[in-house]
């Protein structure tokens, strides 16, 4: 650690002890892309290196930094960072590589992809990305795929925010952002923002509570937010939709809803009213395991202490009833008059002066017959072209864009359907798979299927910073830049009208390149250079910023944040972006697609006596975001092994002590983790951390750096009983499993 | 009336945030000071304090160089 040469006396008042000044240090204003929150932070640069990442000087963002972001300079300086393109020379997954030049890699990739497209059609090319890692994608991947003719793009947002965006649009045409700053009541469905995870949300919630806002937490665990809540409903995992139907039963029967808004701006109220009569509190209490009077109290609090918010939650995204539950959040917001008001749920369009990524994507060039081939659109169409094209005319009318894409989640293929096709079990073959900043193998349900799918490919290309388990299965691994080494224009993935610049802080190391570069090079290799015509990312940003009257250089020096105009109740002028122009409590889009147009609750399949416990996964830990950061010594020291949590009773039932190793298994797979015994856990529920692998373990098959032994995706089924009907996303909150004490794995004995 | 006052308050707050988020002009330092004061948390209830974050001073460039070369 360095010595502090020149502490700034103004900043050592106990509040900002972290802001010090060092000799020869320059600063850059950057957006941390360690997770998808994108905190505004400051990078301190010395001798051409980022040596520190600290909290922003802007009071809006002060203290918005976590340990993962602060350790980024070391994380990206790791000796195992990928620095040169690698070409597979042995069997797939053998871990044998040779270094090649970018020119050679891209030429071969382009030729092989063209050959696959010629033999099987453009739909045989699939891409999976995670947009915070591949921050400079900006829709260029979709753009190239649309020009080439492939609809088969997937992302982790299929079960995290992107799907929520797509489903919200079926109710009121857009995906709102919760205005926690001005709200009187916050409802957290399983979400648990903390000091080192989801930092700005944590800060906003605590500040709102400090000025008197109410907090309702629905979580099977007594989470840190549950401990601070006014009401905590310890609902059974995966029963969010039933709980919301119970709330609606109270709110409608007690006439706590906004009658004027319902009369003027909704359709389907009477049908909804009839549906919620099927969910009296006694039934809801039985399904959710909560006290009916507590459920009633929570519903009353939400409906009467407004403006209130139900911020987006990744928990509701990942359930058997996800579509209904997401729609029920939307319906609660609408019925209680919380749409597009201060302290409610802000419906913002794209920034009016900046070209949105939706326009970059150019979905209009993909022919209808290719859109119709999008995998999963026949059985689970909600976020595919087939589902979302039913509102494109509406979004054009209200928000100005036909193919308005929010959180990149509105025109996706279905991941499970794609992996089946890749494995040779689909309607047509998919033989080329590209993963950019996405550890695909660990990031979706049914990992055994994904492994089979990847092993059945003719061409796998991975653009990554480290040799992930997914990269270990590639034909080519291309070295990726990081957020410290590139400029970035962040538009909140179209979720709000807020746009933020991030300055490049240091040179890109080795032969690492940005995602922008990858798409540009690939467009050239596919003989379509005109698709990505900009010579550099700065020139691309100049193009997108032209409406602001600034170029990238000026924009990035001028703004921490460029806000769009603030307006409320815009629907009074434009209507909502739905086919009826109103909030569709009864969804005409879902009805057209052949689904129940009203929200419902589908219970678990019959219990399996061989699998007596339930587990939930998808959990983020303070030290790690998704499958990343396991290579950072300081973070692994805090959490060296994957750790499940069970209650003392469950531990006792299975003869498990704190720190024992256990196997967790079900019909999908088996993994090993360490056990932690926590009073905050309910009985018979197992909490599984997400995304574990061990970069220090041997690469390649059969272990893939521990992924096959430790990754939660090994346990996540994706058969029909465990998929949401409308979207086809997996149920990760309440999966049957069994638990058994076992010997420590070999690597843990060392 | 309550509705319009609420909207006015929210718009004023958004305007202040917008001005604070520019780095040019002569008003933004004033806005930053104003907002910093408004957002300051009482020391006895400063939920953003974190021992690890507060004590982090970053790295030396040479330390990172050595680390990158696998020397530590």
Image: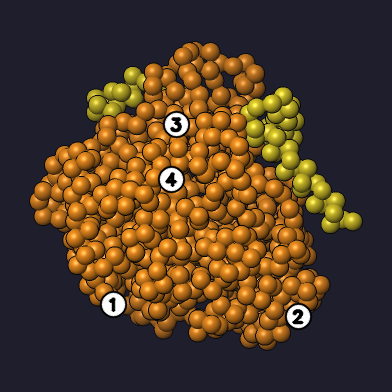
Chain colours: A orange, B yellow
Q: Say which residue label 4 marks.
A: A135
Residue A454, percent from left and from top:
23, 61
Residue tagged 1: A427
* Discs 4, 3 touching: Cβ within 8 Å: no
Q: Where is mark 3, residue-wise?
A: A504
Chain identity of mark 3: A
Q: CA distance from mark 3 to mark 1?
A: 44 Å
Nearest the viewer among B35 and A528 is: A528
Give the mark toward the camera: 2 or 3.
3
Q: Are marks 3 and 1 in contact (CB under 8 Å)?
A: no
Q: In this rendering, would A228 be left or right of A197? A: right
Relative to residue A178, is residue A416 drawn left or right? left
Q: Position of residue A180 (x, y in %)?
A: 67, 51
Identify the disc placed on residue A253: 2
C-beta proximity under 8 Å, tags 2 and 4: no
For the N terminus of chain A, the image quarter is top left
In-image side of A173 versus B16 (left or right):
left
Work out how far the residue at label 2 is from the one at label 3, CA to CA, in angstroms.
Answer: 56 Å
Q: Earlier in the sequence, mark 4 or mark 3?
A: 4
Q: Where's residue A257, x and y in %?
A: 77, 72
Answer with the quarter of the image where residue A210 lies. Answer: top right
Disc nearest the viewer among 2 and 4: 4
Q: Closer to us: mark 2 or mark 1? A: 1
Badge 2 crowding class, 10 Å Cα cut-off, few under 14, some 14 to 19, many 20 or more, is few
Q: CA distance from mark 2 to mark 1?
A: 48 Å
Q: Position of residue B29 (x, y in %)?
A: 70, 26
């Amino acid at each position: 650690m360095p010595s502090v040469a020149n502490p700034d006396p103004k900043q050592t008042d106990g509040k900002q002890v972290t802001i010090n000044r060092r000799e020869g240090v320059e600063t850059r204003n950057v957006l941390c892309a360690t997770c998808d929150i994108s905190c505004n932070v400051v990078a301190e640069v010395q001798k051409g290196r980022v040596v520190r990442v600290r909290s922003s000087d802007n009071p809006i963002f002060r203290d918005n930094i976590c340990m993962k972001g602060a350790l980024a300079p070391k994380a990206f300086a790791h000796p195992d960072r990928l620095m040169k393109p690698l070409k597979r020379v042995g069997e797939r997954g053998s871990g044998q590589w040779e270094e090649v030049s970018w020119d050679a890699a891209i030429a071969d990739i382009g030729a092989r992809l063209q050959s696959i497209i010629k033999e099987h059609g453009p739909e045989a090319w699939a891409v999976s990305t995670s947009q915070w890692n591949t921050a400079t994608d900006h829709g260029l991947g979709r753009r190239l795929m649309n020009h080439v003719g492939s609809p088969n793009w997937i992302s982790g947002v299929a079960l995290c925010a992107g799907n929520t965006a797509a489903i919200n649009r079926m109710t009121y045409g857009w995906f709102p952002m919760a205005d926690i700053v001005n709200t009187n009541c916050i409802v957290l469905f399983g979400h648990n923002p903390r000091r080192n995870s989801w930092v700005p949300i944590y800060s906003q919630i605590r500040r709102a509570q400090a000025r008197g806002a109410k907090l309702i937490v629905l979580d099977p665990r007594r989470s840190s937010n549950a401990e601070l809540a006014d009401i905590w409903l310890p609902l059974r995992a995966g029963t969010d939709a039933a709980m919301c139907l119970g709330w609606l039963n109270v709110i409608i029967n007690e006439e706590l809803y906004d009658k004027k808004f319902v009369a003027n701006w909704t359709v389907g109220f009477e049908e909804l009213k009839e549906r919620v009569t099927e969910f009296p509190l006694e039934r809801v209490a039985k399904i959710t395991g909560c006290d009916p009077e507590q459920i009633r109290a929570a519903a009353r609090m939400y409906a009467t202490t407004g403006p209130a918010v139900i911020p987006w939650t990744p928990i509701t995204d990942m359930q058997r009833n996800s579509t209904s539950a997401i729609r029920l959040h939307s319906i609660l917001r609408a019925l209680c008059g919380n749409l597009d008001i201060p302290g409610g749920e802000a419906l913002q369009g794209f920034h009016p002066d900046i070209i949105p990524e939706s326009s970059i994507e150019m979905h209009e060039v993909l022919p209808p017959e290719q859109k119709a081939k999008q995998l999963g659109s026949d059985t689970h169409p909600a976020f595919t072209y087939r589902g979302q094209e039913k509102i494109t005319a509406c979004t054009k009318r209200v928000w100005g864009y036909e193919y308005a894409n929010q959180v990149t989640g509105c025109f996706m293929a279905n991941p499970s359907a794609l992996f089946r096709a890749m494995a040779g079990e689909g309607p047509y073959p998919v033989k080329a798979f590209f993963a950019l900043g996405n550890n695909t193998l660990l990031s979706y349900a049914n990992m055994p299927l994904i492994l089979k799918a990847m092993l059945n490919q003719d061409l796998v290309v991975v653009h990554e910073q480290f040799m992930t388990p997914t990269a270990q299965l590639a034909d080519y691994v291309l070295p990726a830049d990081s957020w410290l080494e590139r400029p970035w224009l962040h538009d909140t993935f179209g979720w709000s009208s807020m746009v933020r610049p991030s300055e490049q802080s240091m040179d890109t190391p080795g032969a690492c390149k940005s995602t922008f570069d990858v798409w540009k090079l690939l467009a050239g290799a596919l003989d379509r250079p005109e698709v990505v015509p900009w010579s550099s990312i700065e020139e691309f940003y100049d193009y997108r910023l032209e409406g602001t009257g600034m170029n990238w250089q000026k924009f990035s020096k001028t703004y921490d944040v460029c806000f769009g105009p603030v307006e409320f109740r815009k629907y009074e002028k434009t209507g909502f972006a739905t086919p009826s122009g109103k909030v569709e409590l009864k969804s005409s889009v879902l009805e057209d697609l052949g689904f129940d147009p009203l929200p419902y609750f589908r219970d678990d399949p019959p219990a399996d006596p061989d699998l007596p416990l339930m587990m939930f996964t998808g959990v983020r830990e303070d030290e790690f975001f998704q499958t990343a950061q396991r290579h950072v010594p300081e973070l692994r020291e805090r959490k060296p092994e994957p750790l499940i949590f069970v209650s003392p009773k469950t531990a006792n039932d299975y003869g498990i002590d704190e720190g024992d190793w256990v196997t967790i298994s079900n019909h999908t797979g088996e993994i090993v983790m360490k056990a932690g015994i926590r009073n905050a856990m309910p009985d018979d529920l197992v909490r599984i951390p997400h995304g574990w692998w061990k970069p220090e373990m041997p690469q390649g098959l059969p272990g893939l750096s521990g992924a096959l032994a430790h990754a939660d995706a090994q346990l996540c089924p994706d058969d029909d009983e465990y998929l949401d009907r409308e979207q086809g996303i997996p149920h990760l909150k309440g999966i049957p499993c069994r638990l058994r004490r076992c010997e420590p794995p070999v690597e843990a004995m060392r | 009336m309550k509705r319009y006052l609420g909207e006015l308050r929210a718009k004023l707050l958004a305007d202040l945030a917008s001005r604070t988020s520019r780095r040019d002009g002569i008003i933004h330092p004033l806005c930053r000071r104003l907002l910093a004061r408004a957002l300051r948390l009482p020391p006895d209830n400063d939920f953003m304090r974190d021992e690890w974050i507060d004590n982090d001073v970053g790295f030396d460039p040479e330390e990172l160089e050595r680390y990158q070369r696998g020397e530590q």
